[in-house]
Structure formats: C-alpha cells, structure tokens
Image: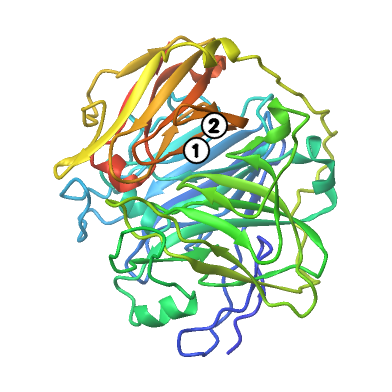
Amino acid sequence: MSKRGWSAAGVFVAAVTAGGRLNVPATPVPEVRSSSQVVSLTLHATVNSEGRDTFAYNGMNIAPVIRVFPGDTLKIAYVNDLPAHSTVSCAISPCKNMTNLHFHGLEISPRAPQDNVIDMMAMPGDTLHYVVKIPADHPPGLFWYHTHPHGESHRQALDGMSGAIVIEGMERYIPEVRKLREQVLVVRGESIEKSRDAAALLRRVEARPSTCGSESEAIERVFTVNGEVRPTIGINPGERQFWRVVNASADQYLDLQLDQQKLEIVALDGMPLAYHDREHAKKVVEHALVPPAGRVEAIVTGPEAGVHATLRTLCVDTGSAGDPNPAMVLADVRAGASAPQTTAKTNRKPEPPEYKAIDLSAYENSEPDFTVVFTEDKNGFYINDRKYEPDAAPMTRARVGTYQHWRILNSSAELHPMHIHQVHFLVFGEDGKRVEHPVWLDTVNVPVGETVDVVMDFTNPVIRGMSVFHCHLLNHEDKGMMAKILFE
C-alpha cells in the first residue's frame, strides 16, 4: 500500500520498507499555535507499541511543532505516563522513568515553572505545569524542546522525545521568507539495535562505513526526518523554500548537504545572522556541520527537473575515541507542487526589525574569565575534573547584565558540543585563531585537542537563577559532563 501524502510540516511522505513494499500513510505532524497570545497544550510521556519512550499529543504518539510569537505565553501540562518500573538500562541505574522538559535555546527564566531542569522532575504518575513567558524582544528562529532528566536524558532523546519550537518573525530580518514555502525538519538518530532487519535499513539510507576517521565500529543509528526513514521532501525545480532543520539526535553529528545546491543560511541556533550583523544576513555554504542540538535555517533552491537529488549528511570524523558518524541519505528531494505552506498566518501587525550590534573587542582581547575543560576516562566524563552532582554548588557564577569571555578546551580524543542553557554566545576564536565572521550560537562544536573562545551574553534580566552547561552528547551529560552556573 502506498505511503503517500503531505505531513503538516510540509514533508511529502513516500517511504519504502527495506523489502521494497510501501508503508501505510504516515501520521501528520500537528502544529500548535497561539490564541490570544497564549499557546496551551497537554503533552504525555508514554511508551509506544515498539517499547520506546515517546511523547503523546491528542492521542497520537507524536511531538507537535509549537509556534509562538515574542510576547506569548506557553503553557504545557506535562504528564508522566511512563511505567513505574523500568525494564531498560540508563547511564545511572536503575532507571526511574523520571522526566521533565527543557526548552532548548529559549532565552527564558531557569526558575520554575519555566526552564528549570534541576528541580522540576516528574516521577511516573506526576504532572508538571510549565508556564513559559517568551520575552517580547526575543529573537525569532527555530528552537526545540526535549526531556532533560539527568541520568536518563540520553535514552529518552534516543527514543525520540523531542519536538520543534518556532518563534515567528524571521521575515523581519529576511523579508523573502514571508512568501516561501516552509519545511520544519526534525532530524533524529534512531537506534537499529532492535530492528528486525538492520542491514536493510542501512541499505535504504545508503549508509557506508565511516571513511573520514579511524573509528571502525559498527553503525548503530539511522537518521529519521520527522519520524520517517528517508522521506521525500517536495520542492519544484528552481523553487526557493525556507528549511528549518534541528539536529535532535541524542549523540550524532550532521554535516548537511543538498545535492547540486548550496545552502543560504539565514539563522543558526535560533539567532538570525542579521540580528547582530545586518551587513551579513546570509552565509552561503556547500554543506553545514550541525552538532547535536544545533539548528540551521536556510533558503534552498529546488534541483533541476529530472534530477534525483537528496538531502544527506556527510561523514563526520568524531575522533579516535568517538562513535561512528557515517555518511547517509536523510531524504529524497523531488518535485511536489501541492505541499502546504506552513508559514504562520496572522493578523498581528508586523514588527520592524531590531538589530543589536555589539562591540565585544574588549572581551575578545582579554584573558578568559572562565575556562571549561572537557575530559573523560573509563569511569566517566568530566568538566574541570568534576562530575555533575545534583546537590553540588555552582561551578561558576555570572552577574546578570555582564558579558564574559569563556574558553572551552577539549582535552579528550573525541568531539564534544558544548551547550549552555538560557543564553547565546559569540564564537570568535577557534584554536587560538580569530574567526573571520563570528557567529552567535547556543551549542558549539569543540574539536579534539583544541580550544574555542566565546563571549557569553549574560545581559538578559530574565535569566536570574540556577542553570547548567554541558556536553550535548547526552550520554556524556548523563555520565557527568555537566555543571551548574548561577546567574545572579
């Protein structure tokens, strides 16, 4: 039977099983939008028919795309319907099936009932009530939500407990996107350990053994796009579309490439490039490295008629101690004139663009205010020689209203993506050299044996409270590579 039709996120689904038989129609990805400046929904943590932990919304095992505007309030009742006793293993055993939510990249309060991943925790049978206030001056872009229970976050993210958040308004900085069809693409890494035919899945995505590094371990994951293995994205020849891609995998890198086309990047990690540098509103690249948790928003052009093009990830060398990140196909890209336009329709008056050009040269030329050192051994993963403890004091403090120069050093033999909650930072130096065009991120890749220098923006008054920073390879975070920071 055909598995054909447009999902609510604009992805045309025509997936084929390993044996060549077409599947049944895919479940569309729902969207939740604001009404009277409030977005309200109930989300459940549950177990699907395959035994994987999953989100459930409106009776479906699916994570909705949440679309909000600056100034809106997001209200989520998060119900933990996971079993009281877990039968799977976690980084910290025994698994307790506890869960919570993190609103990745949003510049919001770390205090309850907002983005508090330290104290807000639901055990099976509990319900958390989140009330997240999006600041009126929040930059537009792509963000995401995922679970963040220390010790169990990797397992839940690997099972797919994640979804996209779009803060509207990108057309303020890139007017062209207002008229473009939009694709929200949530890319996850799915374990093939329990697959009935793992070899067929690997053939389907054209996965090849890693050739870009010394790692020779067996491939353990395939990527999915909006829950589908190798779907088809509809785009007409020469058509320009606005693609918003989040790497929601628990522990895998993406190096995105669209065959025969370039990516016109307009935002990274939910930050429009023009917001801080209006003279460089786009960055045109052949491919884009996206670490776990990173986001890329780009304008793409449809390939020529008759061309079989794909969206793929290139092989990523994660270091001699890293896991394999082989090249594979994410999706086919073919003509499709009937894809829905998912750009929000609203009667709200368009806001003019606001730019925030900042001279941070004094911080860039100063000695670091704080240094983060990633290390690991057979017993775990460390920041500054310490493992995370829930009751530990903050490793560092930051005065709200200031900037700080941080240096991140990777003293291990594998890549680490460093993420900090609540704020963005300017990446201006890599391995002691100045970056030609610095960018603002919330998750930065730190190469093996090298340093990355950033300027942290702690000026937002809403961020007061206890927060965390960590490696976003979530198995590393679960095993200790996280620390607290107090915004005061």
Q: CA distance from mark 1 to mark 2?
A: 9 Å
Q: Residue at x 31, y 54 (%)?
A: 155
Residue at horizontal 66 percent and vertical 40 percent from the top: 267
| Left or right of residue 334, residue 457 in this image | left
Q: Look at the image and tell me whether residue 393 can be seen.
A: yes
Q: Is residue 22 above or below residue 417?
A: below
Q: Residue at x 80, y 76 (%)?
A: 305
Residue wearing tag 1? 103
The total number of labels drawn is 2
Mark on residue 132? 2
Q: Disc 1, disc 2: CB below 8 Å?
A: yes
Ranked by sequence position, the earlier of labels 1 and 2 is 1
Q: Which mark is residue 397?
A: none
Q: Quadrant of residue 189?
A: bottom left
The N terminus - image quarter: bottom right
Q: Which amino acid lies under the numbered mark 2 shown in the image of this protein? A: Val
Q: Residues within 10 Å of mark 2 (few under 14, many from 20)?
A: many
Colour scheme used in the picture? rainbow
Please state which of residues 338 and 68 is positioned toward the viewer in this rendering.
338
Q: Secondary structure at mark 1?
A: strand
Residue 173: image x %, image y %?
78, 35
On the rendered structure, is 85 left or right of 469? left
The quarter of the rendered structure image containing the C terminus is top left
Q: Secondary structure at mark 2?
A: strand
